[in-house]
Image (cartoon, rainbow, N blue to C red):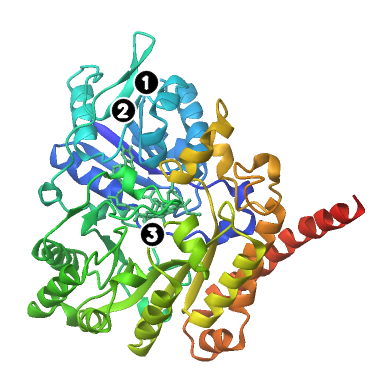
Amino acid sequence: MKVLLVNPSLNRKRLGSYWRFTTAVPPTGLTYLGAVLERDGFEVRIYDQHAVHGSNEDLMAIVELFQPEVVGFSALTFVMETVEDAARQLRAKHPKVRILAGNIHATYFPKEMVESGIADFVIREEGEEAILAVCRALRDGREPTDVNGTTCMEGGKVRHNPTPAMIDLDRLPYPAWHLLDGYAYVPDPLNLAPLQSKAQPLAIQASRGCPFACTFCSQDTMYKRVRVRSPESVVNELEYVHHTYGTTVFGFIDAIFPLSPKQGHAFADEMIRRGLHRKVTWFTETRVDLVTPDLLKHLKEAGLRFIQYGIESGDDMVLSKLMRKKAGVNQARQALKWTRDLNILSFGLFVVGMPGETREQILKTIEFAKELDPDIVKFNVAIPFPGSELWERFKHRVDGQPTWKYSGWYNASINDADNILAGETLPTRELMYLQRRAMFEFYTQPKVMHRYFVQGLVPIDVLAEGFYVMMSELVRSAFPYARAQVSAMAA
Ligand code: B12
């Protein structure tokens, strides 16, 4: 039986020029699903529509060619418009195809997705065991209405089957990377020169879940318990993938890696003991309060070249009260200094526009980013992601309306009417403008430009593209903001 798994595209119109700059990182969840299905004899293809900026017309052409019995969508909140449209087209053109949906958005809106007919079966939380059970039943000609971890329609009513026990990570096969042959992935949005490699950069996962509960994140509710693989098992996989696919650059996709100095040191020891630190380099995302100079040094010896830190804000009150981050600005200062001293590249991630956050606090965050001086930064506007505490607090505002509508945040023409947090934060247009200004202010600093242009940290084509996107987004957001200011003054 044939199964097509799809990583959907973001909506081009909503994204504006950011569309050209969406990062193509391998969809690891789909390669895990592909691996369990192939092990059971299914014929699997992955269409990474996101990576190739593909359309639903392209998807229909692939369905026409491959003729799958099952199509499964990776349904994150931001891609729901694409999924909905694709499902509509599939129903019209290929009515026999059974549609599955998984990932975060499907996990939190299973009822809505099956009732509206977008999906026949929603697979909640981790997908490996449930997708196998659903596909096996379909292969055997049975209707899989009773599979644990799924939601579907039965006799005109929604059937919500119980959530199964969490998966033992050590029993999973390695991701089926061959299913992504032909796609071009990059290790980070700016494709930093020291991280480039001839072979594809691929992903590795050492844990699922997160022990922290930041108010803007859904990781702690999507995976209710943290599970960590042994360092041996992780290094076995790295070694296997390196030998099989020639991979020399790996990215950890854990919420946090390492979760503790103990886990980090044990992993580094194992990498060095096997000599893998001479063959591969890797990057990761962690917290500023979980690193020490010793740990960073050891990780660097083991191949670490690039760290992403969720720094979020330059104001301790925002960090502790509004975000419940449990890490402060001084810890960020230290971590960034240690990282730079060791010549490890860094990526600072910031969030602006939390409910209750003031203009002054946002401006402070912009200054703080410049002071910390990571190699790359990204400022996101706070979004109430389904599954997060922020969402729980404000979801009543969108009752009965399509939830994905409120994911159009990066659209500079968005106004308060489309903003679920309107009234709780700065006016939407001002927030959009400040976010774009933050990027502009950071990237146009002479020291940053010097690093990029003179030292060649960022490839020239990416630089040109990046500057085009940054300028056009700044202009796109500045006009509506200025207009709003003028009408406020007139009133
Ligand atoms: C790698 C990554 C990406 C990759 C790959 C995304 C993908 N679709 O797989 C890329 C770069 C493409 C990406 C893009 C985006 N991402 Co992203 N990404 C991540 C990251 C870091 C890891 C995800 C991962 O691989 N996990 C490991 C695998 C094993 O788990 P998984 O993906 O959850 O898959 C399991 C289940 O969800 C389920 N499942 C998943 N898909 C399917 C499909 C079917 C049919 C079934 C049955 C089951 C199923 O089974 C899988 C195996 O158990 C997470 C943060 C994190 N640390 O988790 C953010 C995260 C998922 N991304 C996020 C966001 C916001 C985005 C973007 C919108 C960013 C942007 N502004 O461009 C885009 C969306 C584009 C898209 N097409 O999905 C949010 C999602 C929030 C939400 N509610 O939707 C997260 C949680 C980060 C965050 N906290 O902000 N992302």
Q: Secondary structure at mark 2?
A: loop
User: If you read the primary sequence from the N terminus, does the residue marked by circle 3 or circle 2 appear first?
Assistant: 3
Residue placed under numbered mark 3 in the picture: 25
Label 2 environment density (alpha carbons within 10 Å; few <14, some 14–19, many ≥20)? some
User: If you read the primary sequence from the N terminus, does the residue marked by circle 1 or circle 2 appear first?
Assistant: 2
Q: Mark 2 is on which residue type?
A: Glu
Where does the image place residue 221, in percent across and percent down from the top left?
33, 43
The numbered disc on residue 117 is none
Quick check: 23 above or below 294? above
User: If you read the primary sequence from the N terminus, does the residue marked by circle 3 or circle 1 appear first?
Assistant: 3
Quick check: 173 above or below 121? below
Q: Mark 3 is on which residue type?
A: Val
Q: Residue at x 29, y 75 (%)?
A: 291
Q: Residue at x 32, y 24 (%)?
A: 151
Q: Quadrant of residue 150?
A: top left
Residue placed under numbered mark 1 in the picture: 96
Ligand 1 within 8 Å of disc 3? The answer is: yes
Where does the image place residue 82, in percent across and percent down from the top left?
51, 39
Label 3 environment density (alpha carbons within 10 Å; few <14, some 14–19, many ≥20)? many
Assess whether mark 2 and mark 3 are in contact (beta carbons under 8 angstroms): no
